[in-house]
Structure formats: structure tokens, C-alpha cells
Image: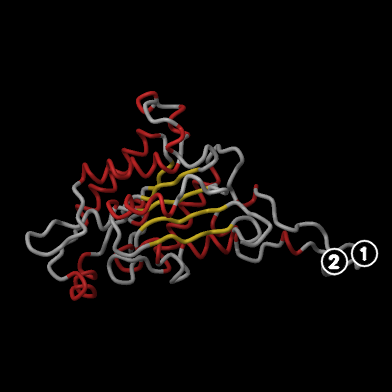
Amino acid sequence: MVGPVRPQFVLFGSSIVELSYSCEGWGATLANLYARKADVILRGYCGWNTRRALQALDKIFPKDATDQPSLVIVYFGGNDSMHPHPTAQSPHVPLQEYIENMRKIAIHLMVNFLHNNTSFLSFSTHQSLSKKTRLIFLSSPPINEVQMHEMLSDLLGPLKRTNESCRLYSEACLELCREMNVKAIDLWSALQQRHDWLDVCFTDGIHLSHEGNKIVAKEIFKVLREADWEPSLHWNSMPTEFAEDFLHDPNCADRKSIINVSNGNFQGNSQLE
């Protein structure tokens, strides 16, 4: 444990999360932008589906932890959407079970929707982590089926994954989020806004390239900017750690005042707004 204690942003999900620090990924972009403001913590696990996530939920997000996260970004669905196979073991989770698993994850992580949706009042608040924890779900992105089969055929073997199944699981995730008043990002649609998305958004047909990661990062920052959360989790609204002027900060051109470098925009933040 090191101090000072900062707000925690936890990224929780399967390979889209685990690999979010590669290819100038959206996780790395978050950590870069929130330097001196929040600790971005990676909890990504390649190959996981919502069944496996539920098994580990209490270990990853213990309810008795002293410090609970301010934000959790969750992505599951791609592996769940793979087709069942009669002989090979598959990560497939039937659509209705996937919906209920995502519901259970949301209930564990947050409580805010309870106050706005009487159909869920049967769930007591002690089942959730904290009243301060905010939540964003990412829906399943599309895939490039041709590129996937060319590059991942040895890994996938007889297992099958299609764009159509990704669409169905993406829509189910978004509908659940509307029902539960959870912030959601429609990655299925966001990536396809680019006319050349099939060519530039993936490294292997499934996992995101630099261009694909940029789209995800921009969508996340849009939610953080527009959300009416108190306190705001937008980077520009959060306090900067050790932001006070320092004697040895560099001088301005007039040599009388100093430049407080803690407030400098070195990361190109405006490109994400």
C-alpha cells in the first residue's frame, strides 16, 4: 500500500480488458490521462466468460475491503457469444444466462439503480460494494470473421464465433443496462462508424488494434464527461495530487511567476474530448 490514497478505477473483463495496455490500448490511455488523479487497476482475464467472472467476483471485489473503487468498467460477452460445440469444450453461455450473469455482476458492484427502479428493491444494499461505486458496461464489439479465421484458426479449432452472435449479445447487454440504469457503451455500433473498420480496428479479427482502442477510449471519456455523477469522474474535474506550486517549478517567460507543471497538458488530452 502506498499513499496518498487515490480513487480507484478498475477495468474488469476478458481479453479486451487484459490487452487494454497493449497497442496503445484504452486502458493505458486511461492510466496516462488520470496520472496524479486516480489509480487505474487492471483485472482482465483472457478467455473468461460471465460464469467464470461470477465465480471470482467476491475475490476480485470483496465487500469488506476498506477502500472500494470509484469506477468499474466491465466487459464480458465476446466469449459468451461463441457458439456451443457438441464435442469440444466451449466458453459459450446461453443468452438468457449471460443476461442474468451480467445482472448479478452489476448488483454486486453498484447500488444506484436500486433507488430509481422499484422492480429491483428486493435486492438489499448490502449486496453491493459501495454507494460511491460507478459502473460502465462495454457491449460486445463486432469482429472481422475473415481475419479471425486466418489468424486464430489454430487457437479456436472447431469453436465458432460470428458477427451475428456478437450483435445479439451486445444488444442484450445494452437492454439490460437501460433496464438497470447502468451506463453502457455500444461498442458494436461505435467501431462500425468508421467505413474502414474491418481493415483497421483489429489485430487478429477479435482483439483491438491501436485504432480500435482509440474508439473505445473516446467512448469511455464521452461517458465520463457527460455523466451527472457527484463527484464527477471526468479527469478535468478531479483534483491533481500535489498540485500546489513548488519552489523549483520552471519560471515563466517573465521570470517572475512559475509554471505549475502538475497542470500541464502533456498527454494530448484534447484529442480525446
- Residue 105 pos. (x, y %): 37, 45
- Residue lying farthest left? 86
Label 2 crowd bin: few (<14), some (14–19), many (20+), radius 10 Å: few
Neighbour tally class for label 1: few under 14, some 14-19, many 20 plus, Cα within 10 Å = few
Height in image: 153 above or below 48?
below
What is the spatial separation of the Cα atoms under label 2 and label 1, in whole angstroms?
A: 7 Å
Disc sitting over residue 256 in the figure: 1
Residue 72 shown left or right of residue 150 in the figure: right
Q: Secondary structure at mark 2?
A: loop
Q: Looking at the image, do the residues carrying marks 2 and 1 touch, with CB atoms under 8 Å apart?
A: yes
Q: Position of residue 186 (x, y in %)?
A: 36, 48
Q: Tell me where residue 223 appears, x and y as whole percent.
A: 49, 46
Residue closest to the eye, 174 or 45 = 45
Is the N terminus in the top left, top right, bottom left or bottom right quadrant? bottom right
Residue occupying the point 15% across, 56% down: 83
Give the residue at mark 2.
252
Give the quadrant of residue 91: bottom left
The residue drawn where x is 31% and y is 38% is 175
Q: Residue drawn at (23%, 73%), measured in percent from left and top? A: 152
In the rendering, at what x and y percent does residue 104 appear?
Answer: 34, 41
Quick one: SS at disc 1? Answer: loop
